[in-house]
Image: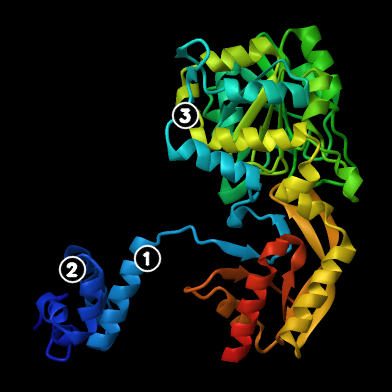
Amino acid sequence: MAKRGAATSGDARRVIPSVDRLLQSSELAGLLREHPHDLVVHAVRHALAAARANGAQGESGPTTAAIAEKVEAHIRALLDPGPRAVINATGVILHTNLGRAPLSSAALSAIERVSRGYSALEYDVEAGERGSRHDHIVAPLRELTGAEGALVVNNNASAVLLALTALAAGREVVISRGQLVEIGGGFRIPDVLRQSGATLIEVGTTNRTYLGDYASAISEGTAVLLRVHTSNFRVVGFVNTVPIQDMVHLAAERGVQVVDDLGSGCLLPTERFGLAHEPTVQESVEAGADLVCFSGDKLLGGPQAGIIVGKADAVARLGRHPLIRALRPDKATLAGLAATLVHYLRGEAEREVPVWRMIAAPLDELDARAGRIARALGRDTRVVDTRAAVGGGSTPGETLPSRAIAIGSEATAESIAAALRRPGKKAVIARIADGRVLLDLRTVAPEEDSELIEALKSIKKGR
């Protein structure tokens, strides 16, 4: 009786070729000429291990050509690990799975400029001595928000974690139950915040929290009143929330501090674009919050970062905390963020920051682009009305009118969407609705129209 795991007479693993035999085969000759020998050997061993595992499951033995294809695919994946550049035709502007905010040309140039060589990241050129990396963004953030001080870390979750660790470790943080939200990837705000060493004191209910709930919860052990903006959902109906101004007044009376986690980092009035009001950083600073935390890569439209602004003494405490070194951003992030902030200082964010350019794009402009694309593609292509979303945990439930290219039918939509994502070209990420593939032009940059047309033409040729 054969031992478990051993090859039997009918086992497909018996016919799997050896490493040496594969390396001498004509199917791998081209790969060996193109790539280092050790890399090809590694890929061959990887492919053979997979073939043996499949053989153990009863699958038939692969041909040499089939193994060669796996070897080539493995090498390609190693040498081009991604992330792949894609065209976002989903109609979700801040698409978390697609990298959130695309950067402006100025931000990209700034990142390239500081990355090509050395930069005065932590060096005061005029004084000829060590400086701080945060000095590059303090002045523009103070000017834009009205805050006394500013810091930057690597994302908003770490910004809030740093704030509570520095201000409330070993003490209590009071938060409304309606703000104990779950963010992307299954991470829950309470779990993140407990890492600070603070004790969360929950007050109110899911839908109604009053100022008196906060007042009753404050004790000698309380350090912070925390507001978390519910930026990825909205509770409507029988609800009550406490304005940040009232929380600030109560905190001042009771000798505690207020941390406002805004999340999306909005600096412009969203009402101007037909959206519901999104709380702005300036409003929280003006209300007197000790610290305001928000993201760099959401409505701000810059690189991933966690931005902290607020009162000088509170920001200084964070800057002195040992955790700041573990969370600090790199030179590329700071350069891209600084360039993005300059767009706001110049009053050109709606024109230069891609997120705001998409939000502000006139419907007649989208209509004209859709018409040109449809004419270029010919039959079986329609222009349809649709709605685009801001996304990224911002303006929940709010949409903008848009135009989309509709192709395919209920029978072909899935295969068309898959073909648009096929490796070997710039992938187009679309959505399927009403049995058709929809390519929403609000999230497609005008300079990507020609690439979109070529991708769609290639799909039509293959059908």
Q: Is residue 205 visible?
A: yes
User: Horizontal placement of 33 versus 232: left or right?
Assistant: left
- Dot 2 falls on a residue whose secondary structure is helix
Amino acid type indicated by mark 1: Ala
Which of pointers 3 and 1 lies earlier in the amino acid sequence?
A: 1
Relative to the observer, which residue lies in front, 259 or 102? 102
How busy is the neighbourhood of tag 3: few (under 14 within 10 Å), some, or many (20 plus)? few
Q: Which residue is mark 3?
A: 119
The residue sitting at 85% across, 70% down in the picture is 367
How busy is the neighbourhood of tag 2: few (under 14 within 10 Å), some, or many (20 plus)? some
Q: Quadrant of residue 285?
A: top right
Tell me the number on the disc at residue 373: none
In 3D space, how far apart are the residues under numbered discs 1 and 2 (Cα atoms)? 15 Å
- Dot 1 falls on a residue whose secondary structure is helix
Do labels 1 and 2 touch, CB within 8 Å?
no
Q: Quadrant of residue 382?
A: bottom right
Which marked residue is nearer to the observer: mark 2 or mark 3? 3
Q: Quadrant of residue 245?
A: top right
Tell me the number on the disc at residue 77: 1
